[in-house]
Image (tube, helix red, strand yellow):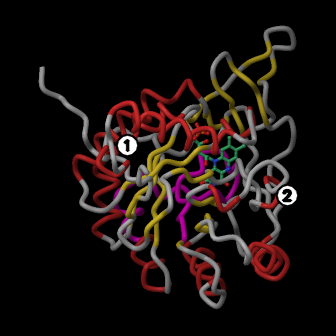
C-alpha cells in the first residue's frame, strides 16, 4: 500500500492533489463527477467581503496551449458563502481552503475575521496576486514590501494557517516568497496566472473585453515549475505548486521540484474527474518506481550531471 499523504506543516493531507481556486467553484459543482473526499482538498473561488459581478464578457479566450481569463473575481461574498455553502460542505473530509481577496488590507482582514467564526475551513489562501481585476485591484504580490505588509496584517487577524499565493508576473519570485515567509506565512502557493493577451485578427479587437487577462494551462507549466523550484530552494515553509498541471506525471514533476502539494486549475475544465485520474497516476508512478511514500519525492530532483 503506497502512502500518498503529505505534510503541509499545519495539517496532513490524504494526498497532495488540491483543486485550485476559480476552477472548482465552491466545490459543490463537482459533486456529480467526483467524491470530494478522494482529493487532498480544494480551494474555493476568491472571496471578497461583498458580492461582486466580475468583469464584462468576453472573459475567456482559448489559446493554442492555454486559457486566458479575465473573470475578475465575481463571487457571492463572505456572508452568503458562510451561511449557504459552508453548511453543505460540512459532510466532506477533503481539506477546504478559502481563497481570500480584498481591495485593501481592511477588506482582507474583514473576510478573515468573519470566517474565523466558522469551523470547517482548514486554512486561508491569500490571493494577493490576481492579474485581471480592472479597477481597485489588489496585487501586493508584485512587491516584497507590500507582500510583507499584507501577510503580516492577515496573520495577526487570522486564527488559521495562511497560505500566501504568489504572482508569476515578477522578476524575482524568491524575494517575494521570502517576504511572505518573513511575515509569518505558513505556506506559499504559486503560481497565479501570467498576464497575457490575444487579438482577433478579423475584428482587430482583443479577444477579451479587459484587453489583458491571465494565462493558465499547459503553456505555463515549464515556467511555473521553474518558479516553484526556485522558491522551494529558498524557503523553509511548504510550497504548493501549480501551473499547467494536466496529469499525474506533471504533478510528480512539481513534487520533485520541491512542492509538497499541487493545485490543479485549468485541467478541471477539460475533465472534471482529472484530479482523481492524477491521484491514480501518481500512485502508479510510485508502484513502478518503487516509491513507498509519495512524500519522499518532495524536492527529490537529481541535479547531478
Ligand atoms: C477561470 C479562472 C479563474 C481563476 N480564479 C482564481 C481566483 O479566484 N483566485 C485565485 O487565487 N486564482 C484564480 N485562478 C488561478 C488558478 O487558481 C491557478 O493559479 C492558475 O490558473 C494556474 O494553474 P492552472 O494552469 O492549473 O490553471 C483562476 C484561474 C482561472 C483559469
Q: Nearer the viewer, residue 286 or 169?
A: 286
Query: Could you tell me if residue 81 is visible in this image?
Result: yes
Q: Nearer the viewer, residue 207 or 253?
A: 253
Query: Could you tell me if residue 244 is visible in this image?
Result: no
Residue drawn at (48%, 41%) of the image: 283
Question: Whole-percent x and y of residue 269?
Answer: 75, 37
Q: Quadrant of residue 225?
A: top left
Q: Nearer the viewer, residue 269 or 90?
A: 90
Image side of residue 26 versus residue 118, left or right: right
**Distance in Å between CA atoms under marks 2 and 1:** 36 Å
Residue drawn at (63%, 20%) of the image: 65
As drawn, 146 above or below 304 = below
Residue 131 is inside the magenta segment: yes
Pointer 1 residue Cβ closer than 8 Å to ligand 1: no
Badge 2 is on which residue?
53
Q: Nearer the viewer, residue 208 or 258?
A: 258
Q: Secondary structure at mark 2?
A: loop
> Which callout, 2 or 1, points at the residue further toward the start of the chain?
2
Q: Quadrant of residue 197?
A: top right
Question: Whole-percent x and y of residue 101?
Answer: 62, 65
As drawn, 88 above or below 52 = below
Image side of residue 70 versus residue 286, left or right: right
Mark 2 burial class by Cα count in 10 Å: few <14, some 14-19, many 20+: few
- What label does residue 255 carry, if any? 1
Q: Secondary structure at mark 1?
A: helix
Residue 225 is inside the magenta segment: no
Quarter that holds the C terminus: top left
Residue extent of the magenta highlight: 124-149
| Label tally | 2
Amino acid at each position: 500500500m503506497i502512502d500518498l499523504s503529505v505534510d503541509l506543516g499545519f495539517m496532513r493531507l490524504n494526498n497532495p492533489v488540491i483543486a485550485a481556486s476559480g476552477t472548482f467553484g465552491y466545490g459543490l459543482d463537482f459533486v456529480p463527477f467526483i467524491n470530494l473526499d478522494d482529493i487532498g482538498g480544494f480551494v474555493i473561488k476568491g472571496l471578497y467581503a461583498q458580492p461582486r459581478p466580475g468583469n464584462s464578457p468576453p472573459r475567456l479566450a482559448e489559446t493554442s496551449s492555454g486559457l486566458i481569463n479575465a473573470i475578475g473575481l465575481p463571487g457571492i461574498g463572505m456572508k452568503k458563502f458562510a451561511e449557504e455553502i459552508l453548511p453543505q460542505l460540512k459532510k466532506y473530509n477533503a481539506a477546504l481552503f478559502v481563497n481570500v481577496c480584498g481591495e485593501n488590507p481592511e477588506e482582507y482582514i474583514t473576510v478573515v475575521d468573519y470566517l474565523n467564526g466558522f469551523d470547517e475551513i482548514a486554512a486561508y489562501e491569500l490571493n494577493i496576486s490576481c492579474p485581471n481585476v480592472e479597477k481597485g485591484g489588489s496585487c501586493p504580490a508584485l512587491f516584497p514590501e507590500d507582500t510583507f505588509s499584507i501577510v503580516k496584517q492577515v496573520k495577526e487577524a487570522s486564527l488559521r494557517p495562511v497560505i500566501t499565493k504568489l504572482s508569476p508576473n515578477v522578476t524575482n519570485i524568491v524575494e517575494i516568497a521570502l517576504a511572505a515567509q518573513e511575515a509569518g506565512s505558513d505556506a506559499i502557493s504559486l503560481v497565479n496566472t501570467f498576464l497575457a493577451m490575444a487579438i482577433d485578427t478579423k475584428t482587430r479587437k482583443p479577444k477579451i473585453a479587459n484587453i489583458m487577462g491571465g494565462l493558465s494551462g499547459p503553456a505555463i507549466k515549464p515556467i511555473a515549475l521553474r518558479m516553484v523550484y526556485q522558491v522551494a530552494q529558498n524557503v523553509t515553509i511548504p510550497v504548493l505548486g501549480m501551473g499547467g498541471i494536466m496529469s499525474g506525471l506533471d504533478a510528480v514533476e512539481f513534487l520533485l521540484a520541491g512542492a509538497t502539494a499541487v493545485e490543479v486549475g485549468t485541467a478541471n475544465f477539460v475533465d472534471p474527474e482529472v484530479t482523481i485520474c492524477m491521484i491514480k497516476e501518481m500512485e502508479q508512478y510510485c508502484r513502478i518506481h518503487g516509491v513507498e511514500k509519495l512524500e519522499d519525492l518532495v524536492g527529490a530532483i537529481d541535479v547531478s550531471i
